[in-house]
Image (spheres, coloured by chain):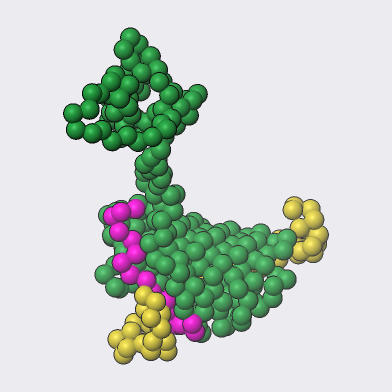
Amino acid sequence: MANEQTSVPLYAAAQVLTAANMNISAGTGVPVFATTVTRDAAFGGANEKVLAEGQLCYLSASNIVQYYDGAAWATVGPAAAASNPGLVCVKAETAFTASATVSADSVFTGTYTNYLIKVIYTTSSTAGLRFKLRAGGTATSTNYNRQDLDAADTTVSASRTASTTSLFIGYDTNGDFKSSIDINIFAPQLAQATLVQGFNDAMFRGASTTPLFFVQSGNQSSSTQFDGFQLAPDSGTTTGTYTCYGYSKAV
Amino acid sequence: MRISDNGTDREMTAAELATYATEQEMAQTELAKENAAKLAKQVARQAVLDKLGLTANEAAALFG
């Protein structure tokens, strides 16, 4: 029995219904099967409908509606659930203008373990940017430790500082020369040391022709649960934007 | 002195100004210390170069 109908009949009172009449209602509609196995077994046997194009079904095991296109079953819906994005924006892009201090609170929560902050910035003077973690609206100024690697033209240098009041995170631009910093923060909400990685691409000292490469890996070694961060130039002000993302923990 | 406070640009309060001043002082002290350490490294490096009779460019060409 093909699924194509040529009419949608209505029956009159006392009308004698034939098998063909009854099969229109028996063989159409949307049958419900537990699985694809029981679905496939339900067609083509003795006193069973031959599977044909246009057949619909609902599979209760997977909660989907399917149709048969004459060769195979295809799913109508619902659409497969979207997988979790790798990064979830937890703090929308935020602009700051000529600020001596830039603070963001209630950004790190228990929802994510690790975070990425993307910063585009300029500095008003030859003073670079420093980074601090915050808890409850207050910046923490102890127990920062870092290892740096700088590359300026052919000169590569490294240094290490310990027990400082902040982490140096970005070189100065000394004017409107857009520079960037990626800051990865690991486990700020856990009561353990917080790891901080910075990757700085700076148009150093006001020249696009003198890009400076600066990476730092470091930590704040207290067992404090932080919920925010702070950027501040050593002197002068900074202008730019920041956006904060949480790294998804599930597929 | 202005602060970007969770996305709001505004003037600092008196308390924030005091905190800022303290933090700046700490930062400047540390910066001076770091610069001194860098300078000491440079001086030590130059001393070695002087002993070897090499310029900085020659040393870079030699050692990468």
The residue located at (23%, 23%) in the rendering is A16
Is B47 left, or right, of A50 in this rendering?
right
Q: For residue B13, which quarter of the picture?
A: bottom left
**Chain coloured green in this rendering:** A
Residue A245 position within the rendered picture, expressed as x and y whole percent measured from the top left:
42, 59
The picture places residue A29, in percent across and down from the top left corner, at 31, 32
Residue A109 part of the magenta-drawn span: yes
The answer to whether residue A61 shows anywhere in this view is no
Tell me, yes or no, whether the highlighted magenta stretch contains residue B28: no
Q: Position of residue A218 (x, y in %)?
A: 45, 57
Give the extent of the magenta segment: A97-112
Q: Quadrant of residue A246?
A: bottom left
Report the residue that reaches farthest toward the top. A46
Q: Image check: A190 left or right of B53?
A: left
Q: Which chain is yellow?
A: B
Q: Is residue A193 above or below residue A14?
A: below
Nearer to the camera, A122 or A244: A244
The N terminus of chain A lies in which quarter of the figure?
A: top left
Query: Toward the viewer: A53 or A88?
Result: A53
Q: Measuring 34% from the left and 57% from the top, which residue is drawn there?
A: A188
Between A184 and A132, the one nearer to me in the picture: A184
Q: Quadrant of residue A106?
A: bottom left
The answer, for residue A149, to whether it is visible in the render is yes
Q: Residue at x 74, y 53 (%)?
A: B64
